[in-house]
Structure formats: C-alpha cells, structure tokens
Image: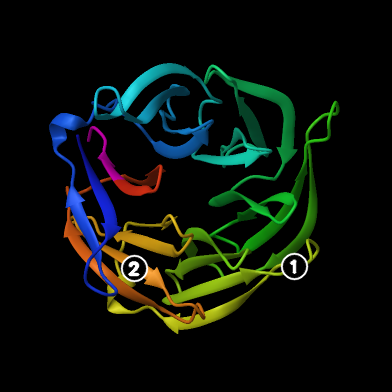
Amino acid sequence: MGQALFSVAPSSAANKLDVKQVDDSKIGSLPSNLTSLAAFEHGKSTYVLGYEKSTGKATVFEAYDEASGTFMKEIGSDALPSGSAIVEPFHVARQPWFLTYDPASEYGEFVEVGADLSLKPVSYKAPIGTGFSTVHPFAYRYGMYFVAYDIENGHVARYQLSVPAGGPMYAAKTWTDLWAQGWTRFAFFEFGGEIFFIKTNLKHEKVNIDHFMDNANEGSHPVLDIDVPAQMAGLHAVSTFSNARGDPYFVTYRSNGEMTYNRFYGNCLGWTVEANSNSIANASLLCPFTVGAKNFVLLYAGAS
C-alpha cells in the first residue's frame, strides 16, 4: 500500500498552479484496506473519513494538526453501515452528514457527525433502489438534493432532502429520466452559485459538463458535449476542488501515477491544464481537501 499528498497553490506564472509533494514524514499512516475517503468540515477544522467496506469501520482523521505540523492525524473510529460502496459527505446548516449506499440494497442511509466527531446513523432510509453506481448529495440555493445514476441501464433520479426541525428526515423523488448507459467519474462543482458536474461516458467515449436546472422537478442539460480527449482517456479517477476565491478546478489520475490539475473555463465549455505531476501508481482513492485557504490532494493505494 502507499499514500501521497500534494499541495496545490497559485503560481507566480499566469494560468499555472504550483504543485508540490508533501514530505511523507509529515503524513500519518492510513489503514491498509480503505475503500472510501471523504473530506468534510466541522467547525473551523477539516477532517477526512476513511471507510472500510468489508467491516463498516470508519476512521476520522484531522486533515492537518497545526500543533504538530502533521497531516492525517487519527482522531478516532466508529461504524458506518457495512457493505456501502458509496460514502458521500454533505452539510445541513453547517452540520456535517454522510450519505452511504450499498448497490445491493434498496436504500441510502444517513449518518450525522456529532460534536465529538462520533457517527450517528439515523433511522430513516431513502428508498433509492438497487444497482446505482453514482449517488451524490449537493446543496443548491436553499435546498439539499442528491442524484442517483445506474451505469448499466442509464436510469437517473434526483431527490430533495428535507430535515425539518423536530421532524424526521425525508427524501422525495422530484425528477427521473433515462440517460445513455456508461456514464462514470462524476465530479460536481459550483460556478456562479449554480451546480455543474463533469462526467465521462465509457461506452460512447464522450465527456460532458452538465448544469442542473433551477427547478427541482427538472434534471440537467449538457453545456459541453465532446468526444473524449486524450487527456481524459483511460483515467482511473476525476475529482473537483475550489480555491480560496471559489474558482472551480478538477484533478485527474491515471493508474500509472500521471496527474493533471485543470481550471474550468468561465463558460464551462472546456478547461485549461495548469499543472502536471507524478504520484504513486495504482492508487485506488483520490481525495482533495482544503485547510483554510490551502488546497491539497491525497492519493491512497490500499493493500493488494
């Protein structure tokens, strides 16, 4: 197994990023069998949750401990629903939560993060259905939503999540459609207060940038629809992040360790590559996170 951490900062040169690898001695050791990594903010600090699908064990790390000057300091461990292939963070009124999903199950499950960073599953389960390959929550204006997509049959649905004061959590399906099969590597970002996402189609060899419609009862429409460029072919992972000014970027990772760091155009009709780097090979997880105004990208390769 292995891990690598990169800092990402603006360069003195125009339209460039300065990417530097953090010394391994400053990074705490991660467990050997993680299947998910997810960054979240709690109070004024950033944390990363590492999850093991087979056991349901979830370990919380402080992304950066200022006192010791180290990254990924272990805080404690707890349990999430075992078997979950998807573990996604979201926030409600600045309170961190996780949405977990096992494609063999019919339900998405919700876990609240306590003030002491304990994980508290709630009794409500969202009836999503089986077989979805992407389930992702996102905030839009004054609402909280999540989208679910099945790579095999193209079924996609959008849900609105309600957490009323003093009442139970509830998710209502507001839109459903049938997309092309084969979409994967969904990565969401915010631009101008609107929600967009970049995705790749393995079956039809396409890359799209989509925008979610304003109405919760409507879906998304493609802003960009192009054939897969060489840069986006054969990737293992794509993930988005924003700098301190809110400018959206995305990072790509290829299993040989090649990485690119890219800034979306203002019209969302493409992007510019602002940095390249090489990392560990055969990483299974890619996790960007922010500490204060500084961006980092964590790579993780579990035990083979």
The x, y position of residue 203, in whole percent, is 45, 71
Label 1 sits on a secondary structure element that is: loop
Whether residues under marks 1 and 2 lie with C-beta atoms below 8 angstroms apart, the answer is no
Q: Which residue is mark 1?
A: 214
Which residue does the image show at 49% across and 67% down from the upper left? 198
Point out which mark residue 262 bears. 2
Residue 100 spot, x, y in % from top left: 57, 36
- 59 is within the stretch colored magenta: no
Cα–Cα span, label 1 and label 2: 26 Å
Q: Quadrant of the N terminus?
A: top left
303 falls in the magenta region = yes
Q: Is residue 177 left or right of residue 59?
A: right
Residue 203 vs 294, above or below: the answer is below
In this rendering, the answer to whether 183 lies above or below 134 is below
User: Badge 2: few (under 14), some or many (20 or more) residues near its Cα, within 10 Å?
Assistant: many
Residue drawn at (59%, 77%) of the image: 222
Task: Indicate the secondary structure of the residue bearing disc 2.
Answer: strand
Q: Is residue 244 visible?
A: yes
Q: Magenta stretch: give its range.
A: 298-304
Instruction: Tell whether 24 sits left or right of 196.
Output: left
Give the quarter of the figure containing the C terminus: top left
**Residue 141 vertical position relative to residue 183 in the rendered view, above or below:** above
The amino acid beneath tag 2 is Asn
Q: Nearer the viewer, residue 296 or 1?
A: 296
| Mark nearer the N terminus (1 vs 2) | 1
Q: Nearer the viewer, residue 279 or 83?
A: 279
Q: Is residue 161 left or right of residue 295?
A: right
